[in-house]
Amino acid sequence: MLIGILVSCEKDLFELEALGENTGIVGTWIEEGTQRDTILLKRSGELDELKYGFTIQEDGTFIERKNSGFCGTPPISYANYDGTWEALSDSLLTITVSYWGGVMTYQIRIVSLNEEDLAIKYLYSSDMASTR
C-alpha cells in the first residue's frame, strides 16, 4: 500500500517538474476569447456554468467544461467531463478526456502564461507531437 502511494506521489511530482516554469497552469481557466488559432483564458476560482473552461489538478486530473451535446448553435448547454493530463514538456500537455460522444485525446500547447492569463493552442490528430 505504501509503495503505491509513493509511486503515485513521484508521478505527480514528475508531471509538475516537466512543466518547468509553467507549473502555474495548474488551476481553473475560463475562455475569454480567441486570437486567430490561439485560445485566451483567465484564471478563475471555479468553472463558469455558461462558458468553456477547464481545471488542471496537480494529481493529473483534468476537468473540462464544454458542450454537452453535438449541437454547437447557441444557446449551448455545458457539462463537466473528467479526464487526465500528462506533461510532455514545459509547454506541451496531452489531454485525454470524455465528451458527449465518447473519449478524445488532444494536446495543449502553452503559448503564454502568467498568474491571471493563459494563451494556448489545441493540437489534434496529425498536429500532435509524439508522446515519447
Image: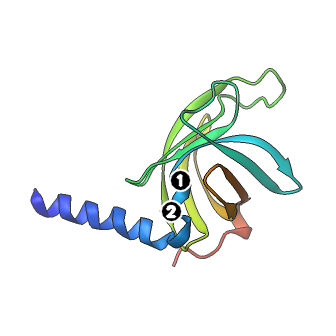
Q: Quadrant of residue 11?
A: bottom left
The structure residue drawn at horizontal position 58% and vertical position 33%, both measured from the top left corner, is 47
User: Contact, CB < 8 Å: mark 2 with mark 1?
Assistant: no
Name the amino acid type tagged 2. Answer: Thr
Upstream in sequence: badge 2 or badge 1: 2
Residue annotated with mark 2: 23
- Compared with 16, 78 (above or below) is above
Q: Nearer the viewer, residue 56 or 1?
A: 56
Percent coordinates x, y for residue 41 in the rendering: 70, 46
Q: Residue furthest top?
A: 75
User: Seen in the image, is 17 located left or right of residue 130?
Assistant: left
Relative height, residue 43 to residue 89 (above, below): above
Q: Residues within 10 Å of mark 2 (few under 14, many from 20)?
A: some
Please give the label number shown on residue 39: none
Q: In whole angstroms, how far apart are the C-alphas of marks 2 and 1? A: 19 Å
How far from the left and from the top, in percent, is residue 58?
41, 54
Report x, y in % for residue 5: 19, 58
**Which residue is painted at 76% across and 49% down in the image?**
40
* Quadrant of the frame with the N terminus: bottom left
Quickly name the residue at label 1. 96
Residue 66: image quadrant is top right
